[in-house]
Image (cartoon, helix red, strand yellow):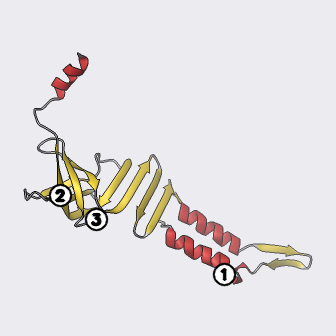
Amino acid sequence: MIIQSLQKLIDTGEQLYAKVCTVHRVDKTNKCCDVIPVDGSAELFEVPFHPSESDAGLCLYPAPNSHVLVVFINKHHACICGVSEVDLMKLTIDTTEFSVDKDGFLLKKENETLKKLVDDLLKAILEIKILTPSGTGTLDITSQPTFKTLQTRFNNLLKDV
């Protein structure tokens, strides 16, 4: 009885429905895009691709000219809920952010990023000084290509922003 009462209370008489659309323009800053329904109906402007205005949760940024599934909550509100091609995927949980795009991925917690942490570690390894019986010397790690190669590989995989 309670469920039926709640359903009557929120029932607006409008049916939920969805349309497959082609992405015409993407606005990454405002997390929305303009789409053209494949059924030939009118273009839809500024359809959000995240269900809320907060940065929390998972957000898929569709690629231009890709296909998306637009779900209509009512005549005036819709949201992207399926994406055929992604330009950016961003997951935010509290102060932790994980994002992936064509340039690599970013793992960030507050002001610390994995790239900065790995880079600082490799720089510290390259600056190691060794105490020898004849005094302080330096270990010439820079001549060992392994560390430089690792640093390049990490830089190619990770992003800082």
Amino acid type at image mark 2? Cys
Report, in whole angstroms, how far the alpha carbon at label 2 lies from the one at label 1.
Answer: 50 Å
Report, in whole angstroms, how far the alpha carbon at label 3 lies from the one at label 2.
Answer: 12 Å
Check disc 3 and report its element: helix, strand or loop.
Answer: loop
Give the labeled residue for mark 1: 145
Marks 3 and 1 close (CB-CB < 8 Å): no
Report, in whole angstroms, how far the alpha carbon at label 3 lies from the one at label 1.
Answer: 38 Å
Would residue 93 appear left or right of 11 to someone viewing this image?
Answer: right
In terms of sequence position, does the residue under pointer 3 or pointer 2 come before the other?
2
- Name the residue: 91% across, 79% down: 134
Q: Residue furthest left?
A: 41
- Name the residue: 40% across, 69% down: 102
Amino acid type at image mark 1? Pro
Q: Quadrant of residue 101?
A: bottom left
Residue 161 visible in rendering = no
Name the foreground residue: 152 vs 116: 152
Q: Quadrant of residue 125?
A: bottom right
Where residue 11 appears, x then y in whole percent? Answer: 15, 29
Q: Quadrant of residue 148?
A: bottom right
Give the labeled residue for mark 2: 21
Disc number lying in front (2 or 1): 2
Marks 2 and 1 close (CB-CB < 8 Å): no
Check disc 2 and report its element: helix, strand or loop.
Answer: strand
Check disc 1 and report its element: helix, strand or loop.
Answer: helix
Query: Dot 3, crowdedness within 10 Å: few (<14), some or many (≥20)?
Result: many
Give the labeled residue for mark 3: 63
